[in-house]
Image (tube, rainbow, N blue to C red):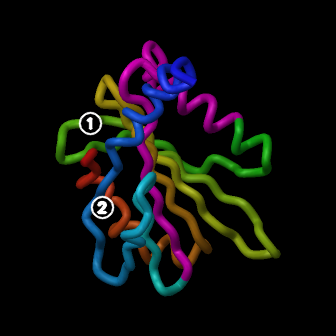
Amino acid sequence: MRYLFILALPLLLAACATARMDVPAGFAHFDKEQSQFLMAAADGFMVRARIAGGGDALAGNLDIALWQKETDGFLTARGYIPATKREVKTGGGMTGTLTEYTILYNGEEHRYAVALFSDGKQLFTVEAGGSAASFEKHRTQVEQAIATLRAE
């Protein structure tokens, strides 16, 4: 039992920090979520932010290019088509990538975006998705929220 605790310690330390962003007007924040930051708009558009790492959990594996390649491979294998990719920054000085994907779901175009950041100790992910129309409606709000991404 003692060894199980020692092995789980890095995961517990990682769980101490939670991703946070400012909540834009028109979004509801699910404040009972402890392991992730989750918010939604009335039209079903969802945004989620999480942190992985801390301690030695991801030591040596915080290269954004590596995670971008893995994310892209995972999503394209499931039918997502990359649409755009660009560099984005947070107010706290982290630089990362934001990639947007499209997919047809029930005959309707949907969009899914993944932003990846690293502060050198942790990997931050922000995911946003919904119908193409709701994505365009909320694009600026999501980008403004990403700019406020931080660990708390």
Q: Is residue 136 placed above or below 148 in the rendered structure?
A: below
User: Going by the image, does 75 lie left or right of 129?
Assistant: right
Tell me where residue 140 appears, x and y as whole percent. Answer: 34, 67
User: Going by the image, does 87 lie left or right of 11?
Assistant: left
Amino acid type at circle 2 is: Ala
Q: Which residue is mark 2?
A: 145
Query: At x 23% / y 54%, what residue is drawn?
Result: 148
* Cα separation between marks 2 and 1: 14 Å
Which label is found at residue 85?
none
In this orientation, which residue lies closer to the viewer: 33 or 118?
Answer: 33
Mark 1 packing: few (<14 Cα in 10 Å), some, or many (20+)? some
Which label is found at residue 94?
1
User: Going by the image, does 34 lie left or right of 83?
Assistant: left
Mark 1 or mark 2, which is nearer the start of the sequence? Answer: 1
Query: At x 54% / y 33%, what residue is drawn?
Result: 68
Q: Residue furthest left?
A: 92
Q: Is residue 51 placed above or below 54 in the rendered structure?
A: below
Q: Residue furthest top?
A: 60
> Magenta segment range?
44-73
Amino acid type at circle 1 is: Met
Mark 2 packing: few (<14 Cα in 10 Å), some, or many (20+)? some
Tell me where residue 60 appears, x and y as whole percent. Answer: 45, 13
Name the quadrant of the N terminus.
top right
Q: Is residue 45 visible?
A: yes
Tell me where residue 99 appears, x and y as whole percent. Answer: 51, 46
In this orientation, which residue lies closer to the viewer: 103 or 6?
Answer: 6
